[in-house]
Amino acid sequence: MTSTRYELVVVANRLPVDLSVAEDGSTSWRRSPGGLVSALEPVMRTTHGAWIGWTGSADVEAEPFEADDMHLVPVTLSADEVADYYEGFSNDTLWPLSHDVISPPEFHRHWWDAYRRVNRRFAEAAAGLAAEGAVVWVHDYQLQLVPAMLRELRPDLRIGYFHHIPFPPLEIFAQLPWRRQVVEGLLGADLVGFQRSGDASNFIRVVRRLTDLTARGQLVSVPGKDGGAERLVRAAAFPISIDSSKFDAMARKPEVRARAAEIRADLGNPGVLLLGVDRLDYTKGIGHRIKAYGELLSEGRLAVPDAALVQVASPSRENVEAYQQLRDEVEGLVGRINGEFGQIGSAAVYYLHHSYPPEEMAALYLAADVMLVTSLRDGMNLVAKEFVAACVDDRGVLVLSEFTGAADELSGSLLVNPHDIDGLKDAIERAARMERREMRTRMRKLRRRVLTDDVTKWSDTFLAALGAGVDGHEPPVVEDAHLRLAHQPHREGPRGGQG
């Protein structure tokens, strides 16, 4: 481990780069396209911070290295740990538990043991890298035990944690056999951030029910170790966003606009082009939207070739059985609709089981008339914000599930309950036939919000609320009413109340 210490350390399940292994066994790295990378890049560049994460491949050992003004520290996971910690406990226990048990969670003690063991490895790596009094920002549900483990190792640190997915209500969370250990793990942080205020409220309610700690408003009082001063932990909403100016600029490029026109031409220039973009995940409501679209075709409310649906479903967790079943179901549904309503040269549904680079996604967003986001449960859903940022001509309609975090912010969209197929059909038809004037009014409202509340504002706001400047200076007081928190001395913890 390097002897250099860092004022800001990010701890996430994955590094911000992807590992490529050539045929000769040599390795190379390329930057990941994820939103978290874009969110943290500016502050990481400023501080030359360190980022701890898994390489994404089992049994790959790599030395720390420098990339994009960041010090990257790979964490090695064995094949068994990938199966038990990542595919098992993280994605077959915690993920379904956090998404309304759409798929039943599984509880296995050896998965839990692996989860604890891997979390300890991440915590030890962070403890060895952080400077005295540094800020450590831990990310997401794979690492919920790290804050407490890290505080035990380094009580001098300022620790933040952000939960990118929904936090379940007590009645669901209580099913977890290791519920108290997870709560205690999160309470090791000074600030626990969530996408929605409802998620933060769920966490506070869980703390009240499963511990004997005092919780008032957003604050939880945690007794100091060995009779030391109590520490205040704050739980609050910090809705994440995207690098919206980057998507806006990308969508204005002549080559991207030309590609958008080419996409429409390749599809036969339909009168209305519907678009869905998701990871192939059972939480995304892909089947619900395709079913609603199929019924619209059956009822004659939309017709091929005047209407077309493009569904991008990027591969996801293909070793997990529930995802294999979902792929079979979606592809079967697409086949049935195309068989019944498709024509020679004109499909009803264009199903694409691929991932695409940002420029191609921007062109798809530009080409679309209606964006369908029908998640059954989503922490935020950044695709909705990407679509809005790419609609530089104020053209396009967003149909958005009310069960996404984005629904709290994107009030210019058509909100739907994806379980209500009739209501979803009505919203799709309304979007397809919306007059230009209403479309422009709605999209301008959406774009003002997305372009103003971008990912940089999100990271700056979280770090300010954490109450410790990463450059040695006092952070600003956050002006948003629900995020207001002034800087407090390190040993006292954050202070605040209901927003």
Image (cartoon, rainbow, N blue to C red):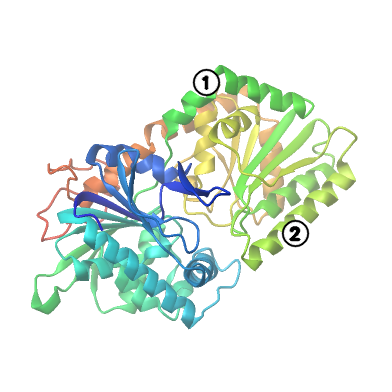
Q: Which residue is mark 2?
A: 329
Compared to residue 248, the image places residue 112 above or below, namely: below
What's under tag 1, amino acid-wise? Arg
Residue 71 at x, y = what percent? 30, 47
Q: Residues within 10 Å of mark 1 (few under 14, many from 20)?
A: some
Q: Which residue is mark 1?
A: 252
Q: Secondary structure at mark 2?
A: helix
Mark before the other along the chain sequence, 1 or 2: 1
Q: In this image, 105 relative to 321: left or right?
A: left
Pick the residue in front: 411 or 377.
377
Residue 314 visible within the image: yes
In percent of the image, x 41 and y 60: which residue is there? 61
Residue 266 at x, y = what percent? 76, 27
Residue 270 visible within the image: no
Q: Residues within 10 Å of mark 2 (few under 14, many from 20)?
A: few
In the rendered view of the protein, which quadrant contains the N terminus? bottom left
Residue placed furthest toward the top: 254
Compared to residue 54, the image places residue 452 above or below, namely: above
Residue placed furthest toward the front: 24
Which mark is on residue 4?
A: none
Residue 345 at x, y = what percent? 87, 32
In percent of the image, x 75 and y 45: which residue is there? 293
Give the quarter of the image for residue 287. Answer: bottom right
Pick the residue in front: 495 or 462.
462
Residue 58 at x, y = what percent? 50, 63
What's under tag 2, amino acid-wise? Glu
Q: Spatial distance from mark 1 to mark 2, Cα to Cα? A: 37 Å
